[in-house]
Image (cartoon, rainbow, N blue to C red):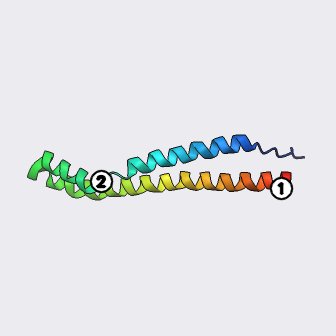
């Protein structure tokens, strides 16, 4: 027993738009200048913070790279949703 699959193109479009907006926002945040942020922390901490900065720099760079990947995933979800919607609409109206 299975229920019929009902695609709702308007809902798919809304879902795609929400993911595209999320992608843009997340990517903008992840595009921060890691070197400038590290330099600002180095100035604030001075030589006493050298040990901290040795771990902070790579961690911050990894965090920003991961953030960009999440933004890319949202963009991919949006694109896949658009492709699915177009296929469903073409099949239903073809």
**SS at circle 2:** loop
Q: How many marks?
A: 2
The residue that mark 1 highlights is 91
Residue position marked by numbered label 2 in the rendering = 33
Kindly identify which numbered label has been placed on residue 40.
none
How far from the left and from the top, in percent, is residue 53? 20, 54
Mark 1, mark 2: which one is toward the viewer? 1
Label 1 sits on a secondary structure element that is helix
Q: Position of residue 28 (x, y in %)?
A: 41, 48
Query: Camera-side residue: 46 or 94?
Result: 94
What residue appears at the point 72 percent right and 41 percent down from the top-left corner?
A: 10
Q: What residue is shown at x 66% (from left), y 52% (from top)?
A: 81
Mark 1 or mark 2: whose residue is earlier in sequence = 2
Tell me the distance, in whole angstroms, between the alpha carbons under discs 1 and 2. Answer: 46 Å
Q: Residue furthest right?
A: 1
Quick one: quadrant of the C terminus? Answer: bottom right
On the picture, is 54 further left or further right than 81?
left
Measured from the top left, where is residue 5 in percent x and y?
A: 82, 46
């Amino acid at each position: 027993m299975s229920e019929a699959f009902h695609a709702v193109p308007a809902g798919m479009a809304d879902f795609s738009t929400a993911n595209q907006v999320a992608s843009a926002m997340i990517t903008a945040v992840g595009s921060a200048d890691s070197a400038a942020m590290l330099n600002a922390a180095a100035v604030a901490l001075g030589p006493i913070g050298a040990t901290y900065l040795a771990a902070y720099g790579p961690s911050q760079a990894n965090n920003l790279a991961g953030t960009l990947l999440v933004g890319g995933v949202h963009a991919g979800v949006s694109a896949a949703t658009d492709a699915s919607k177009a296929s469903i609409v073409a099949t239903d109206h073809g």
